Amino acid sequence: PHFFYKKLMDETDHDVKGMPEFSSRISSWVFLENPSYQEKLAYCTARGVINKDTLKYICRHKIYKNFRSLSSLMQHIGLLAIRETEGID
């Protein structure tokens, strides 16, 4: 993430112990864009979310701006589904 890069560069510039050496071992940085609405939609659909209102909410909500937050949400939804169906035959 951008904050990690910025913090590492700040600490490297201020010669914080070990940071210049650590920084020198990283040959390149790849900054990824956040997923698009369509990518989030495909990700959630592939994981079993089928309700259109739920999909719209998830894909538009700013808190779910990357795949890490979407993955965490999918895990929580899965746990809730398991809890709801445990007592059902």
Image: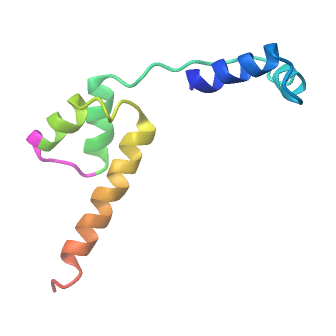
Q: Is residue 50 magenta?
A: yes
* Vertical placement of residue 74 versus 30, above or below: below
Q: Which is more toward the observer, 11 or 72?
A: 11
| Dominant secondary structure of the residues highlighted in magenta in the image | loop
* Vertical placement of residue 31 versus 51, above or below: above
Q: Residue furthest top?
A: 13
Give the residue drawn at x 27%, y 26%: 38
Q: Position of residue 68 (x, y in %)?
A: 45, 40
Give the residue drawn at x 57%, y 21%: 2
Magenta span covers which residues? 48-53
Q: Is residue 5 magenta?
A: no
Residue 61 in the figure: left or right of residue 72: left
Please tell me in which quadrant of the rendered image residue 19 appears.
top right
Please tell me in which quadrant of the rendered image residue 52 appears.
top left
Residue 82 in the figure: left or right of residue 69: left
Q: Which is more toward the observer, 44 or 15?
A: 15
User: In the picture, which quadrant includes the N terminus?
Assistant: top right
